[in-house]
Image: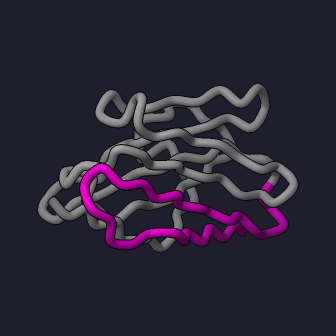
Amino acid sequence: QVQLVESGGGLVPAGGSLRLSCAASGRAFNNYPMGWFRQAPGKEREFVAAIRWSGGRAYYADSVKGRFTISGDNAKNTVYLQMNSLKPEDTAVYYCAATQILTSPVLADTYRYWGQGTQVTVSS
């Protein structure tokens, strides 16, 4: 089994920054591709960003390109989401996800393992 634990959420004014972390653990985890999704109240869960450990290729939703950066630390089995220039519409619960084989980074169904989520609130 793989366990994912997010941290770093909080309340921030518009234009501010936050860095989310997701620590992966479990004997089954072996540099699985990882991603971030978010879900706002009354909306469906949506893709934010994803990363492949080998090669470090990253994927981003159009809505966050140029503002968010996903990165990883192999030694710590941790993936980060640096969020800059935050907007009120970025307010959501942010979830970390992992999968053994990343067939389609943007689809939630691609991911097998999920964290419990961390709340990000951006005030206007």
Residue at (38% x, 42% y) in the render: 47
Residue 62: % across, % down: 33, 27
Q: Quadrant of residue 38?
A: bottom left
Asked if residue 27 lies in the magenta stretch, the reply is yes
Name above or below for residue 33 compared with residue 29: above
Q: How many marks?
A: 0
Quadrant of the image containing the C terminus: bottom left
Q: Which residues are magenta?
A: 1-29
Q: Position of residue 113 (x, y in %)?
A: 57, 60
On the picture, is 86 further left or further right than 54?
Answer: left
Please provide percent x and percent y for residue 49: 48, 40
Nearest the eye: 42 or 60: 60
Q: What residue is rendered at 81% in x and 60% in y?
A: 76
Q: Position of residue 12 (x, y in %)?
A: 32, 65
Q: Residue at x 66, y 70 (%)?
A: 3
Q: Quadrant of the N terminus?
A: bottom right
74 displayed left or right of 45: right
Is-magenta flag for residue 31? Answer: no
How are the colours assigned in the image?
one colour
Residue 34 shown left or right of residue 10 in the figure:
right
93 over 109 or under it: above or below: below
Left/right of residue 5 with respect to residue 84 in the rendered view? right
